[in-house]
Amino acid sequence: MFKFKTKQLNFGEVSIANTKDSRIKDKLALLSKGLMLPVAVLPIAGMLLGIGAIFPSIFGESNEMAVLFGNIISLPGTIVFRCLPILFAIAIAISFTKDAGMAGLSALISWIVFCAIQSAFLVHKGDSYYFMWYTFTGTDGLQEFSGIFTTNNIPGMTSLNTSVFGGIIIGLATAYLYNKFKAIQLPKTLGFFSGVRFIPIISICCAMLLGILFSITWPLIGKGLYYAGTGLSSAPVGLNSFVYMFLNRALLPFGLHHVISNLMNWTPVGGSWDQQAQAIAYWNGQYYQVGNTMGASWATVLNINNATVISGDANINYQLLNYVGRTVTLTPLTTGEMSSVNVHLTPDMIFKGTKYLHNGSYTFNPGQYVSGMGAFMMFCLPAAALAMLLAAPKGDNRKLAGSIVLSAGFVSFFAGITEPIEFTFLFLVPWMYWGFHAAMAGLICMVNTILSIYTPYGGHFVGTCFLDVMTLGIIQDVTGGGINIWMVCIIGLVFSPIYFFFFKWAIKRFDLHTPGRGGNQLFSKKDYLAKKDNKNLKGNERIIGIIEAYGGKDNITVVEACFTRLRVQVKNGSLVNDDKLKSLGAVGVVRVSPTSVQSIFGTEADVLKTKVKEQLEME
């Protein structure tokens, strides 16, 4: 009988090591960690925005107590998003300096100086800002800036809108300076400023130079990113959503999906919403002015304080939670159209309205890069887990397989943590992951974009899940927000049978060694019980076991963690015992390079990192 030949990898182990670029992969792993640190605080900030917006929607904006209570809840979330560039600067600096506090402080100071230098080159005339370097247009050799190029994230200071790009650059520069000069010894007369006290000083000087450099180059770069985001948001039939989600899933095994996710979620490449632009809405087949005053901006009609340009798909999604569901007046743009009407504001009305002001192009499309995640996280991956369970022979093998795949499927459904279930079949049958799952995830995301399903980005690690649907979707729909959250379930129910039947057919047709089947049977009962016992070891016993599995104290140089992975740098990768790590609770092991080994422990990874560092007496 014909047998499909596929490379079977040992469960829990995948190697992507290449000595020529191992250092680059190590640096990318640190970058990935730094990018995820600010994201960890966004779920609570997003919930505050969503919950705070409910009160004005239900009781009306004329109810002062409802507005006050809503602001008390939502404004703490708003300020977190306004300060994202600062958070990224601090996080990147900390990530590349082994959690050095002085590096984080220096990054904060550098960001303030960076913005101050840019502010010095901006001239305020009337309602516009002009820039002194450029003579392309404008009066007296000054280049006028629209709202997309300026921002006021720092109170009392208007600077260039460099989004999180500026924060990342400042963070990287500060980390480099810290690592290079942290042990510098100055002459005795300046001895007080030796060592880490020198870092803020040199960082300020560097930030001044970067501020000047960005003042010269960023206007052109910013325009390029803005137009790239506009072009992608106007892509036909959601092709941009398909490509993004395919790459997101394809890069997940290497831990590099955070890079592309942050690019689309927090920068102009993911779209831009100018809150100072004219408030044009699209409703019932026509364009309308929002509010009673023709030409009024979103900032005016929605009472947005310190209005600015919101960049990035997830960032826009979060901000829209403040306003969707509100009752607004739509005024016809021209005479002869129907009279003014009062309607609930929806994301669809806002983003389609941008087409009126931008020559038929959308400046953003909310949810285009995140809305499809809910369907495959809550329905499709659990369906694949069920297929793998039923494909295992009855008896002990099925029970053992069920203990792994069902719990992994539930975590995907409830909390949006997909690595346990995705890595289960990635390690055993790689072609099913990259050839089927990544492509299907892209297709689901594309369908969601076509059908205008604006699932809010809940930030529960990788995207939408049951928690997000309950806290950021249903409530907004009930209050007239037009999220269409119920469509997530419809799409999930349509695609989950495809996952189930394909997985079950492929496993049996090609005799694939998924959990509980064939030569790659996960564990014997004795192995399973031993693993369970090891995972439940008290305190230091398990931590010591993890250290020993990584080759001992002398072999470990750096210990870090992201949401689900313990990321360890070692001197000699050959001393790392993958089987022992799995027996201590790791779902799998990823060898990023000969000296970088990551073990997937799930949500306890960060706790394990802290305990391992304490045991090793690391800083």
Image: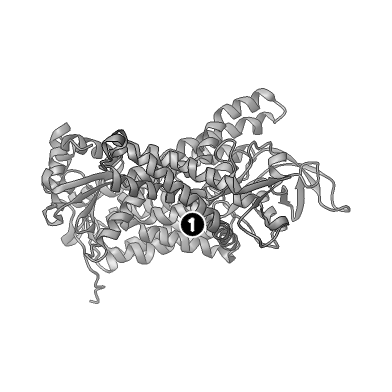
Determine which quarter of the picture holds residue 515.
bottom left
Q: Secondary structure at mark 1?
A: helix
In the image, taking residue 435 as reference, residue 51 lies left or right, namely right
Query: Where is mark 1, residue-wise?
Result: 494
Give the residue at x 54% y 40%.
82
Q: Is residue 509 visible?
A: yes
Graded by Cα atoms within 10 Å as few (under 14), some (14 to 19) or many (20 or more), the crowding at tag 1 reads some
Q: Classify the position of the N terminus by image quarter.
A: bottom left
Query: Colour scheme of this structure image?
Result: one colour
Image position of 464 with respect to 497: above or below: above
Give the residue at x 60% y 48%.
150
In the image, taking residue 10 as reference, residue 229 lies left or right, namely right
Q: In the depicted view, which residue is nearer to us: 160 or 232?
A: 160
| Farthest-out residue, front | 189
The amino acid on which the numbered mark 1 sits, given as a three-letter code, is Val
Please provide percent x and percent y for residue 217. 53, 58
| Farthest-out residue, bottom | 2
Please provide percent x and percent y for residue 510. 27, 69
Q: Is residue 458 visible?
A: no
